[in-house]
Amino acid sequence: MTPQQAAAAGAVRGLPPALLPGLPFTSLAPMQDVTNLPFMRVIARRGAPDYFFTEFFRVHAHSRLEGSILESVTRNDTGRPVFAQLIGENLADLRRAAGDLQRHPVAGIDLNMGCPAPKVYKKNVGGGLLRDVAKVDRILGTLRDAVPGLFTVKMRIGFEDADNFAAVLALINKHGIDLLSVHGRTVREGYRGDVHYNRIAQAAATVHCPVQANGNLTSAAKALAVWRETGCAGLMIGRSAIRNPWIFRQIREAGQGLPVHRPTLADVRGYVQDLYEATRTEGIPEKAHVNRMKKFLNFVGQSVDPEGRFLHETRRAQSEAELFTVCDRHLLAAPDQPYPDEPFDGVVARPNCEAPISTGDGCRL
Ligand SMILES: Cc1cc2nc3c(=O)[nH]c(=O)nc-3n(C[C@H](O)[C@H](O)[C@H](O)COP(=O)(O)O)c2cc1C
């Protein structure tokens, strides 16, 4: 164990207690239009992460805390702490939003310094902040003053390249950030391609707070390998938790050397049903809800069959009946067959489903 891992295991930095101290802690990565309260509940029913993060609250002169995101904090009954994420750049607005959020039972306030959508970074928020180290300094200072509790940061390793990375890590120390989540890609690298785990190791060796590794932790085995390789304290998982909602319990089991839960295709069928029911909002037309489900199935389908037939067929479904006929055909023909841990090579989620549908290439702001 590195000093960073040992410190986190002892919770010396004051993070809320993890489910099983002594193991790397886990978080569900914030994902806009995905990680709302119904989705957190669906995940928690299959083995909760240690921590949840809300999708980002937009912060600008006229912003108010968005009710649908806020309920993932105020009505959260998963039993797990929820960090509330902000995206913005104006100091007074960020201070106000952080103050407003702290009137609710948040585990901490998280700052988004990673969103790669052009619409976002052109406003110099999210990943756009990484171009301006002086501004990061001011924002971290302002929010540190405004947040007596836990103040956390989620960042990429840079904008075009990692040239500013060391300077930003120094600011993480300067401002006493409590937890740093690092998605090991630059903004330009988007969501694909290799993750620079060596940069996560650099962060873990540099900062005084626990570091969570993020980016392509596709299975429990991969996540634990990255934990060992980088010396980080925690593991943050996004898209692979949509594909495999059992991943957090699998990490705990594998981390303890216990037999690892192996979901079957029938379990996946149950997951899809649960998702369908849990995420349905009153009044939403059936076809719109079926289309919304495709955002999740886009990832689930990466492990169903190597030819991507499930993906192809679910993308064509127009009604609930059509959707579940496809699910039954692929998931109940051999219900006891294990659901693979890793995605099949070459079965890719559509790029526009790796980010909110509204922009097609990243975060909606
Ligand atoms: C659909 C989608 C929405 C996302 N929304 C957010 C967000 O609101 N805030 C944020 O910090 N990151 C957001 N991200 C980035 C993820 O939190 C995570 O850093 C990224 O997906 C890499 O992790 P993964 O490989 O485990 O998915 C989003 C990613 C996806 C795919």
Image (spheres, grey):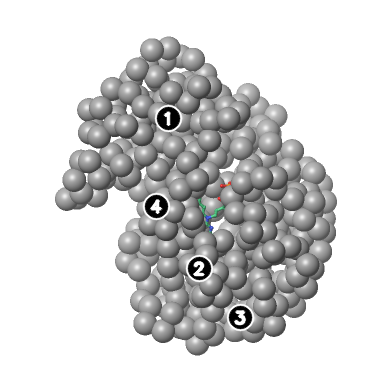
Q: Residue 311 carries which label?
A: 1
Taking 78 as reference, is 159 above or below it? below
Residue 44 versus residue 111: which sits nearer the camera? 111
Dot 1 or dot 4: first in sequence order is 1
**Amino acid on which the number 1 mark rests in the picture:** Leu
Q: In this view, does 310 lie above or below 79?
A: above
Query: Which residue is the site of mark 3?
Result: 139
Q: What element carries label 3?
A: helix
Q: Distance between the residues labelled 2 and 1?
A: 30 Å
Report which residue position mark 4 lands on: 357
Q: Give the Cα separation between the discs numbered 3 and 1.
A: 42 Å
Q: Is residue 313 above or below residue 12?
A: above
SS state under label 4: loop
- Can you tell which of label 3 and label 1 is closer to the viewer? 1
> What is the CA distance from the residue labelled 1 to the residue labelled 4?
17 Å
Task: Specify the amino acid type for callout 4.
Answer: Ile
**CA distance for labels 2 and 3:** 17 Å
Q: Position of residue 53 (x, y in %)?
A: 50, 58
Task: Tell me which residue sits at (44%, 54%) in the image.
Answer: 360
Q: Tag 2 or tag 4, which sits nearer the N-term?
A: 2
